[in-house]
Every structure is written in C-alpha cells, then in structure tokens.
Amino acid sequence: GQNIDQPTEMTATEGAIVQINCTYQTSGFNGLFWYQQHAGEAPTFLSYNVLDGLEEKGRFSSFLSRSKGYSYLLLKELQMKDSASYLCAAMDSNYQLIWGAGTKLIIKP
Amino acid sequence: GAVVSQHPSWVICKSGTSVKIECRSLDFQATTMFWYRQFPKQSLMLMATSNEGSKATYEQGVEKDKFLINHASLTLSTLTVTSAHPEDSSFYICSARGGRVAGELFFGEGSRLTVL
C-alpha cells in the first residue's frame, strides 16, 4: 500500500534550525511536496523535489533521496511565525498526491 | 502565483439542511479540482476529484449522493453537502493544479462547516 510517515509534533527554539523528516512508499513516484499549514488555514506550497539532492529556498531547504524513499524539510533561523503544521506529500504514478498526517512544529522563544 | 478562491469561509447550518460551497480559480482555468475534508489535528483527506464537464470521481467511503460535486465551467466547482448532520462538521478545502511545477496545488481558503 501507499504510505507517508512523518513525526506528529516537534518543538524548536526561535533562531534555531529544525529538520522535519518524511518517509514514503508509493506506487511509482513523480515528486515530493512540502506544504505549510497554519491553524485554521489552507495549506500553502513550500517546495517540490523530483531529483535527489537539496533544494534551497531562502530559510527553507528540502532534500530528497529516492533510493531511500526519504525527504526532509530544513528550516533555518526559526521565527515564531514558522509555528505551523508541515505536510509531506508524495505524488504517485497516477499523479495523485498521497498526504502525510502533518508535523506540528512548535516554536518557543 | 495562481489564485483559488473558496466561499463561504464559515457556515453554520441546522441538521437536515443542505450547504453549497464554491471553489473558483481566479486567474487560470482548472480542468481538475480536488475537494478535501480535514478534521481537527488530522491531515487532508481527499474526498473527490472534480472534472470539468464530467462526473466527479469519489474516493472510497465518500457518499456521492451526500456530497454532490458540480464542475460546470473551467473556473468553478461546487460541493453541496446534502442533508447535513453534525458529524459532517469539518473543514472543507478545494484545490486546483495551476502552478509552474507539475502537480503543484493551489488551495482555496477553506470552508469551516458547523452543523447544529
């Protein structure tokens, strides 16, 4: 079956760095997405990886290893506004997104 | 980037009534839109895929007669929750593919439904 695993909750300190891991098992693979979702709001797109390696976009970076079925989202210089849920989603061979349950990130001052 | 607008943002209704939620792509044409439901502290659950000009494709366990989807134009899809019950209370979100990245989804603002 198809499955996405990511931690339920993580806590980090303002100004620090945090890495949110995601492992996936899908029927075929057409890319890995990360979305940010603040409480009570719809998700917003953060990143997309389809090739192995690290994609950097400002304070956020995303990494993919297709052979390991593994990705992570790296957040640097954490700000209080980064407190949100981070959703990992893998696209299968039918271009359907398989969603993880999300990782709630709590930022402490 | 592409904009998807959803309306209403909040709706409260009595049990047994029907509620319609609209999802519009404002600056692009969306042949396919997706409807999700999200319960508190849970991830998105795909309910159905809405295809312009044809019937929606429902996920397993989603009642198509209860959750009516109409995708009459390239910019509008509607979800009607018929004979709503308190257990239908949830956050409903639509999305459409419209970004430069293949498969990137743009989400509407979401509609929070409370059935009394």
Image (tube, helix red, strand yellow):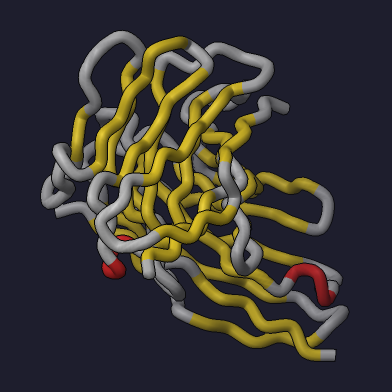
Q: Find residue B114 and report its horizontal and vertical position in percent.
A: 44, 64
Q: Who's the residue at 57% across and 40% down the image?
A: B7
How many numbered circles are shown?
Answer: 0
In screen coordinates, is B16 left or right of A6? left
As drawn, A82 above or below A69: below
Q: Find residue B27 and report its horizontal and vertical position in percent.
A: 68, 16
In screen coordinates, is B52 left or right of B101? left
Q: Name the one closer to the observer, A69 or A20.
A: A20
Residue A91 seen in render: no
In screen coordinates, is A73 left or right of A27? right
Quadrant in which the N terminus of chain B is drawn: top right
Q: Name the one closer to the observer, B66 or A21.
A: B66
Q: Find residue B106 and report its horizontal and vertical position in percent.
A: 58, 35
As drawn, A109 above or below A15: below
Q: Name the one closer to the observer, B7 or A64.
A: B7
As drawn, B107 above or below B1: below
Q: Find residue B73 and report its horizontal and vertical position in percent.
A: 44, 11
As drawn, B116 above or below A47: below
Residue A6 seen in render: yes
Q: Who's the residue at 47% across and 47% down the image?
A: B93
Farthest residue toward the bottom?
A109
Quadrant in which the C terminus of chain B is drawn: bottom left
Q: Who's the residue at 64% across and 87% down the image?
A: A11
Q: Who's the residue at 78% across and 87% down the image?
A: A13
Q: Name the one closer to the observer, B100 or B91.
A: B91
